Amino acid sequence: MLLSMGLGTLGSIIVSLGFSIEMIAIGMIMCGAGINVSGGMLFYFLNEAVENIKRQKYSIMIQIGYNVAAIIMTGLYYFIGNWRIIFIIISMIPAVVAFFFFVIYIEETPQFLLKG
């Protein structure tokens, strides 16, 4: 989980600081590779930590969050017009905060700890 989040976070920093289209493209590939893996793993954490009654509700809330974020980014671009500022505010800063949160507070999944 940390490797995929680290890859996504590094990719978002590269996109934000990119000075050429090639550098931005490499950063976007890193973002996609890291965030898609950690996004998929999020549901495994949810399955292990949440009881059956609330699991589906939380899964739907996570999936709706992606769509709401896309709508917010589109609206911000319409009003601000600078994609780099929007990417830094909406993508890079939350990715860095989430990465450091996982590094500091999240150890392993509950199922893994029971096996060890």
Image (spheres, rainbow, N blue to C red):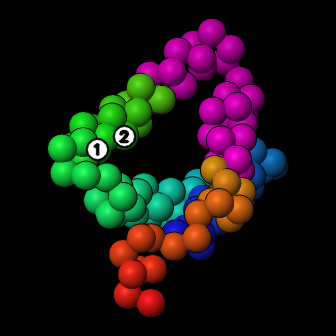
* Mark 1 burial class by Cα count in 10 Å: few <14, some 14-19, many 20+: some
Kindly indicate the quadrant of the structure image that contains residue 36.
bottom left
Which residue appears at 31% of the width and 40% of the height?
A: 58
* Span colored in magenta: 70-97
Where residue 68 sits in the image (x, y, percent)? 41, 26
Kindly indicate the quadrant of the structure image that contains residue 45.
bottom left
Placement of 79 over or under 29, stated as above or below = above
Asked whether 60 falls inside the magenta stretch, the response is no
Left/right placement of residue 42 relative to residue 21 reads left
Q: Which residue is mark 2?
A: 62
Kind of element beneath mark 2 = helix
Task: State whether the magenta stretch is mostly helix, strand or loop.
Answer: helix
Placement of 42 over or under 76, stated as above or below = below
Where residue 27 sits in the image (x, y, percent)? 65, 57
Instruction: Give the amino acid type for the residue marked by disc 1 in the picture.
Output: Ser
Q: Quadrant of the C terminus?
A: bottom left
Left/right placement of residue 28 relative to residue 44 reads right
* Mark 2 burial class by Cα count in 10 Å: few <14, some 14-19, many 20+: some
As drawn, the label of residue 59 is: 1
Disc 1, disc 2: CB below 8 Å?
yes
Where residue 23 sits in the image (x, y, percent)? 72, 58
Q: Is residue 27 visible?
A: no
Kind of element beneath mark 1 = helix
